[in-house]
Amino acid sequence: MLTYKRGNTAVCGVFSMNDRMEGLKHAVGEGAGVYIVEDGMLNGINGKEDNLGIVEETKKQEKVFRYWRDNQYVYGRRIENSSMWLCMSIPCKIWTYMNVPQLLLLIVTAFSVLAVFWLYRFIRRELVWPLRDLTETMNRIRQGEWNARTGASGHLKEIQEVGETLTAMVSEIEKQKMLSYEETIEKQKAQMQYLQLQLKPHFYLNGLKTLNALTLARDWEKSQELILHISEHLRYLLQTDRELVTLGAELNYVRNYVELQKSMTGRPVVCEIQEEEGAADFLVPTLCVQTFVENSVKYAKLGAPGLELFIQVCVQLLQTEDGVYVDIMVSDNGSGYPENILEEINEDAQKGIRSVGINNLKRRCALIYEGKAEYNFYNGSGAVSELILPGTNPDGLEVRGKADERIDS
């Protein structure tokens, strides 16, 4: 019974709390608890004890309270103008509010999310990463890294076959490239040997003809002297199987050649050789100096018979940003190169049909130094021939340091 009094009037009401609480319980659903707290006493219709702390909470609050405890939402409100609290507890487990179709939909959704996540990881591991590795490998190969190999790994047979095919293709290309290099080198060696052989018979025939003439003239002293010079001459040619010789050996050969020519022809020839200290240890192509000296001996025209032919050989070392270069200049006091010959020898050696010796030397220098050799032909007080070669030490390596450190290092 509840009594409400105002002034001299009092209103009394009687109702059944059990019926009211049953209605509330039915409204909030099964599993919920409805409680009445009055003067610190808990009255519930579900027979539960106060294990949610409802009574304690009514003592602390004045009108309303709400909180979570033991997976339940607890709510309480004080009835106005009374000491009574109406409280309820509602279970908050998800399956409490969901029916079977809703639960099945939730389960299917969860499995779909997991499946999408697994599929994403599978595609990334088995397709994206291997393809990315293949792309990076192909880019490295495009940049010239022929030793690049793909590390793509996966369970997809097609990706594995692509990786294996790429590796096999790169290996085959590298193999063919090496074979091409070897064939080019062999071709160049064969061409070098052929070019050198073009010169050797020329000297043999000239020497034999001269020796034959001296023998017929019974000039035994000159014959003996000529034989010594020829033997030295042939010894140099026959021992020169290499493409390069020391500049000192080449200059000694030039001195012997000049003496040979003087013995053969009796022509007054003076050959002055000036070489910078240390230049004799550099490697140069065979006959690179003798070719120009021979050209002067054979073709230099003087003003009158019996005049002395003067040949000057000057060797200098040039220090550049690219390293040390050997500058060889041969000049004479003749009438110089004819204009047609001068035009020809200053052009590409492949086009030359005359001046066999000079064009031969230019072709050999092009093969040995891969286009780094320079040459210059012009007329000064006579014919001037200049050849500039990259400095090469006795080990066959180009000298990059300073000129005074070129050999000792």
Image: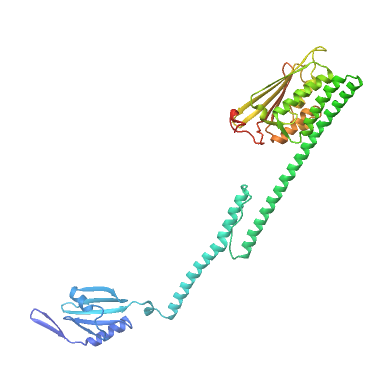
The colour scheme applied to this rendered structure is rainbow
Q: Is residue 100 visible from the viewing direction of this image?
A: yes
Say which of 80 and 365 sits in front.
Answer: 365
Q: Where's residue 359, x and y in %?
A: 77, 29
Number of numbered discs: 0
Vertical position of residue 395 compared to residue 227: above or below: below
Residue 319 figure quarter: top right
Q: Nearer the viewer, residue 298 or 156?
A: 298
Rendered view: 104 above or below 360: below
Name the quadrant of the C terminus: top right
Image quarter for residue 268?
A: top right
Image position, residue 307 (x, y; %): 79, 12
| Residue 386 percent coordinates (x, y) | 70, 24
Q: In the picture shown, does residue 316 fall above or below 69?
A: above
When asked about the image quadrant of residue 337, the answer is top right
For residue 406, side relative to residue 299 (left or right) = left
Asked whether residue 342 is in view, the answer is no
Residue 217 lies left or right of residue 398; in this view the side is right
What's the residue at 79%, 34% (across, down)? 195
**Quadrant, the N terminus:** bottom left
Residue lying at 78% horizontally and 40% vertically, measured from the top left: 190
Direction right: furthest residue: 216
Q: Tell whether 272 sits left or right of 299.
A: left
* x and y percentages locating residue 18 in the rendered image: 24, 87
Q: Nearer the viewer, residue 108 or 101?
A: 108
Residue, far left? 8
